[in-house]
Image (cartoon, helix red, strand yellow):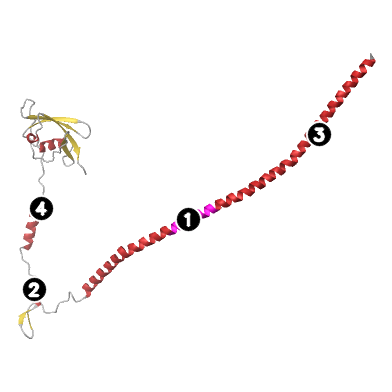
Amino acid sequence: MSCGLAPKWAAEWVNLKVSLQLILQGVFLFTLSTLLLGWLLPKIYTLLLCAIHSLVPAKAKHEKDDLELYESKKKEHREKSQTQYDSLASEYNQRILIPRQEEKRRKKEEDFIKFLGPAWKGKGSPLGGQVFDDENHCDSAGQEAARRRIVREDINLDVLAAAASNAAKKKKIKHVITLPDEPSADEPDAISVLFRTPLGTTFQRRFLNSDKVQCLCDLITTKGFSYKSYIISTSYPRVLLSDPNVTLLELKFGKRILLNIEEKDA
């Protein structure tokens, strides 16, 4: 029995020995691969950085060239715009400002010469009386001037009368609102007028055919819509009732009519 157990233990020992060898080989290979990766990865990282840095300057240089080209075009456009502006300003000065200044200067010189020159200086002569020259005996310039200075005594009265007359013509007669009596609904000549206001409200009143448009204007004035700021119009076709002296019979409204109150255009 002891002989049978010896080969069994020998086989197990061989298997254990093989397993240990395999484990040691695996650990060795793992350690070796780890060391290789630890040595290779920094090298690869350095190479990648060098490649990236070699590409970046070219891109930066390209961007720098584009920026310089943009600045150059910008400067060129600014100089061109400034040249055009200077040309227009010079043309405006030559065509408008300089002639205007010359005209002002010429007018000032004329006024100055007119004030200091001999134009206002007449020949000296005594005021009133007579003067004698070598040839004729005539009235002096002073006597002529004295005659021209004589003013009519009633001239102020004429001016006041003319001013009063003009004021009376310009003075407007104040219009007094007097609405006619409202006729009954049975009146054959009665017209029922419905007014629509700009506020959306309505009101109604009856008038006679003989009443004028002025009566309608007076009515809307009493309702708060002064005819100086508002106007009356028909709905369709739209017709403005601008003549206050027209009667309702002439407008041919019939027995019932709808009118709009509109604000006049400013």
Q: Residues within 10 Å of mark 2 (few under 14, many from 20)?
A: few
Measuring 64% from the left and 46% from the top, which residue is drawn there?
A: 52
Residue that badge 4 annotates: 167
Measuring 69% from the left and 45% from the top, which residue is drawn there?
A: 47
The Cα atoms of the two marked residues, 2 and 3, are separated by 145 Å
Residue type at tag 1: Lys
Q: Nearer the viewer, mark 2 or mark 3?
A: 3
Q: Nearer the viewer, mark 1 or mark 2?
A: 1
Residue type at tag 2: Ala
Which quadrant of the structure image shows residue 217? top left
Q: Residues within 10 Å of mark 4 (few under 14, many from 20)?
A: few
Q: Work out whether 187 lies above or below 69.
A: above
Which is more N-terminal, label 2 or label 4? 2
The Cα atoms of the two marked residues, 1 and 4, are separated by 73 Å
Q: Residues within 10 Å of mark 1 (few under 14, many from 20)?
A: few
* Badge 2 vs badge 3, beta-carbon distance below 8 Å: no
* Badge 1 vs badge 2, beta-carbon distance below 8 Å: no
- Which disc is residue 73 wearing? 1
- Which disc is residue 146 wearing? 2
Which is more N-terminal, label 2 or label 1? 1
Q: Residues within 10 Å of mark 3 (few under 14, many from 20)?
A: few
* Badge 1 vs badge 4, beta-carbon distance below 8 Å: no
Percent coordinates x, y for residue 49 in the rendering: 66, 46
Residue that badge 3 annotates: 28
Q: Nearer the viewer, mark 3 or mark 4?
A: 3
Instruction: Give the SS element for disc 4.
Output: helix
- Magenta-drawn segment: 65-79
Percent coordinates x, y for residue 252 in the rendering: 9, 33
* Badge 3 vs badge 4, beta-carbon distance below 8 Å: no
Q: Work out whether 164 lies above or below 211.
A: below
Q: Nearer the viewer, residue 65 or 138?
A: 65
